[in-house]
Amino acid sequence: MSEQERLRELDELVGEYVLGTLVGDERLLFEQKIRVDSIAADAVQAWENRLAPLQNSVEERTPSSAVWRGIEQRLGFVEDKVEQSFWSSLRLWQGVSAFATAMGFVLAVVLLNTTTFNPQMLYVVQDQQNTNWIVRASQQQSVVAIEAVNPPQLSEGKVCQLWITTPDGTVHSMGVLPHNGSINFPLIKAQQLLSSDAELSVTIENSATQYKNSPSGKIVSQGRWIQI
């Protein structure tokens, strides 16, 4: 299998994992893989970065009591004699389980949007004394928030990418920095990534490049977390 085919297979597997459609033993095996494989872990982080902007499109709403009653009834928490044989169907419960799993990440994104964010770490990306981005992070909440302030102009096909090098020397891709607005996303291995000894850097990369072990483009910012 070629390197390109392996990356494509990894991308499909990561997509299933993040969306919640990878279940059972396959999910457990993949979770073991991302604990020891930095490429797989970075791929998961990249997928979560792609889905993070979904939170900006979700409006906070309080479901009515009728909606909750309907959910309880359909999940079988409220007895329904008329529909009892229907709800005892194995196929139906498998469908409910798959749907609930797939909604797991969406619910996590919604929680990020509705839960108060309390950052303890800060990193400011600057260029010639101009602030380009502000990166804030919470180790307790395992969340990073990136806000675009005055991003530099880039040539077509180029993006700025954030990297974190942990104290053990492992480089982790944190994804592409936004050119407007802000994004919040959950972190894997937050304790290591948000260590005061971790080194942050921003490089200019080709937008088509994915899942590299380390940055290859020009470094435009480099430093460490500031505790706030």
Image (cartoon, helix red, strand yellow):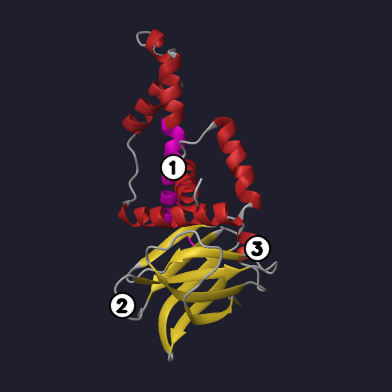
Depth check, mark 1 against mark 2: the one in front is: 2
Q: Tell which of 202 and 72 is nearer to you.
A: 202
**Which three-letter amino acid code belongs to the residue tagged 2?**
Ser
Residue 130 belongs to the span the image colors magenta: no
Location of residue 224 in the rendering, given as x and y in whole percent from the top left corner: 60, 78
What range of the chain is rendered magenta? 99-117
Q: Is residue 75 visible?
A: no
Which residue extends farthest front? Answer: 2
Residue identifier under label 2: 155
Which SS class for mark 2?
A: loop
Image location of residue 202, percent across then percent down: 48, 75
Task: Work out which residue is located at the far bottom of the displayed protein and give it.
Answer: 128
Pointer 3: what residue? Answer: 192
Q: Amino acid at mark 1?
A: Leu
Q: Nearer the viewer, residue 226 or 24?
A: 24
How packed mark 2 is, by other alpha carbons closer than 10 Å (few <14, some 14-19, many 20 or more), is few
Question: In the image, is residue 207 above or below residue 111?
Answer: below
Q: Which residue is mark 1?
A: 19
For badge 3, the amino acid type reads: Gln
